Amino acid sequence: MVRKLEELLSLARENSKKTIAVAAAHDKEVLKAVVEAVKLNIVDAVLVGKEQKIRELAESEKLCLENTSIINEEDEKKAAAISVELVISHKAHYIMKGMLNTSDILKAVLNKEAGLKKEELLSHVMVYDTPAYHKLIILTDGGMVSYPELKDKIHIINNAVKVAKALKIDMPKVAAISAIESVNPSMQATVDAAILSQMNKRGQIKGCIIDGPLALDNAISKEAAQHKGIVSEVAGDADILLVPNIESGNFLGKSLTYFAKAENAGVIMGAKCPVVLVSRADSAKSKLYSIALGSLLG
């Protein structure tokens, strides 16, 4: 089991080397992360974007562009489309978002004519490494699906479980998070959580252990769970936190980053390849970890 994000780099280096297509690669932090990943022999890279800007950034930051190729494209939306085409034509294994809007990269990925979209739901999966927890914690979905229904949550769980398996977590423990840990018909998140837990017990959702509803405290703290008399395989030892909506996921993720000083890695799952997507505000190190994670999934 991978317990620290730093371990991702070694695991990715042991894996077969992948090629990443970077859409709108003219971004300093993205370029620094990609060049470092190339240097570590995790990936080769195709940089799609404003070539002059890419070369200027590389020169100013003293970045070596060896084992990268550049496709000059001034238009960022077209850069996204080209990156998708590189995957479809087997010239790249997965995609990374650079200096363009998330909506533009998603539009390219979801374009039915391009052929990258599968029938499954796309969802955002973040992996956090925080000193406050005894292992990595996976958070989903704080970036893609605004208000998931029960059927959506099944896809979101399955996408997160794939990430957990890539991190060598054989049977990930999923905590379906709500404000309380008892079922309340007036709170849909608690009802969904109980149904998901029961579906898991009956083998309708496989490859993981689901329990819920669980409040955040008893999902991540054995002491809190014991204090409330909760007996659960998941309580206090969750690998995956399934949040009820995008706001709660967004708030929790940013709290982990800014209050708990957690490092992170993020990908979009559900397409024919992972899409590396983290905040523009995230560090080059976070982006490097995300590239390594994507290489394990691509």
Image (cartoon, helix red, strand yellow):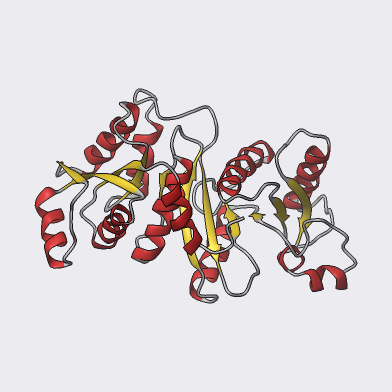
Quarter of the figure with the N terminus? bottom right
Q: Residue at x 67, y 47 (%)?
A: 170
Is 109 left or right of 47, judged from the image as shown? Answer: right
Q: Residue at x 42, y 54 (%)?
A: 290
Residue 282, visible in the rendered structure: no
Seen in the picture, residue 235 relative to 163 is either above or below; the reply is: below
Is 92 left or right of 225, judged from the image as shown? Answer: left
Quarter of the figure with the C terminus? top left
Toward the top, the furthest residue is 113
From the top left corner, tell me how far across and down residue 254 is, in percent.
50, 67
Q: Residue at x 37, y 45 (%)?
A: 103
From the top left corner, tell me how far across and down residue 180 is, in percent.
78, 62
From the top left corner, tell me how far across and down residue 233 is, in percent.
81, 56
Toward the front, the furthest residue is 14
Toward the right, the furthest residue is 229
Residue 75, visible in the rendered structure: yes
To which quarter of the image does residue 75 belong? top left
Is 54 left or right of 260, judged from the image as shown? Answer: left
Q: Residue at x 53, y 50 (%)?
A: 125
Seen in the picture, residue 113 relative to 200 is either above or below; the reply is: above
- Image mark count: 0
